[in-house]
Structure formats: structure tokens, C-alpha cells
Amino acid sequence: MRKSITISIPEELEKEIDTATKEEGYTRSDLIRESLKDYLYFRKLNKLRDVMRLKARNQGIVTDQDVFEKLL
């Protein structure tokens, strides 16, 4: 099921959105929908990265070199 939401944005952002939609052939809804999907994906990725960073630190893995040494 689809839901509609209403948001308010600054005029400058609206202009940038309209420029991007023209250049890429998206509708405003498509562009904003994809942007939100990307944001939520990277949010999950960053949370996972934080968890993994803590686990790595607990195992003495702090630097990139530490990672390479564990893998090789």
C-alpha cells in the first residue's frame, strides 16, 4: 500500500530537486523516494559499522593494518 506525505522544504532545495529530476528523468516523487531509500540504507550500514568497529576493537583490531594482518 502506498501512503502520501507532505513535507515543506526551502525554495533552494526545491530548485535543486527540479534540476536533478530534469537531468535524470525522474519525477519528484521518484527522486525523493530513492533518496530516502538511500538514506535509510546508509543509516543501517553505519549502525552495523559501529557495532563491528566495537567488536573489532575488543579483539585488538584498530587500524587497517590490523585488519589486513587478521585476513592474511
Image (cartoon, rainbow, N blue to C red):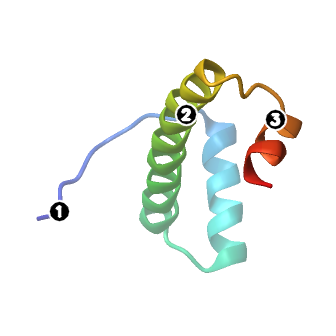
- Given the image, on which type of amino acid does mark 1 rest? Arg
Residue type at mark 2: give it.
Met
Relative depth, front residue between 34 and 3? 34
Measured Cα–Cα span from mark 2 to mark 1: 35 Å
Separation (CA) of disc 2 from disc 3: 14 Å
Q: Position of residue 54 (x, y in %)?
A: 57, 22
Residue 38 is left or right of residue 18, and the answer is: left
Q: Where is mark 1, residue-wise? A: 2
Q: Nearer the viewer, residue 71 or 53?
A: 71
Q: Amino acid at mark 3?
A: Asp
- Disc 3 to disc 1, C-alpha distance: 47 Å
Say which quadrant the C terminus sits in: bottom right
- Decide if residue 27 is on the left or right side of residue 5: right
Return the residue found at the far bottom: 25
Residue drawn at x 59%, y 33% is 10
Instruction: Write down the residue under mark 2.
Output: 52
**Residue that mark 3 sits on:** 66
Secondary structure, mark 1, is loop
Name the image quarter holding the N terminus: bottom left
Other-residue count near label 3 (Cα within 10 Å), few / some / many at <14 / 14–19 / ≥20? few
Answer with left or right where residue 63 lies relative to residue 30: right
Q: Nearer the viewer, residue 38 or 9?
A: 38
Q: Assign a secondary structure to mark 3.
A: helix
Question: Horizontal and vertical percent for residue 52?
Answer: 55, 34
Residue depth check, mark 2 versus mark 3: number of the one nearer the observer: 3
Q: In the rendering, at what x and y percent does residue 7 appear?
A: 38, 38
Q: Residue at x 52, y 54 (%)?
A: 38
- Circle 2 — which element? helix
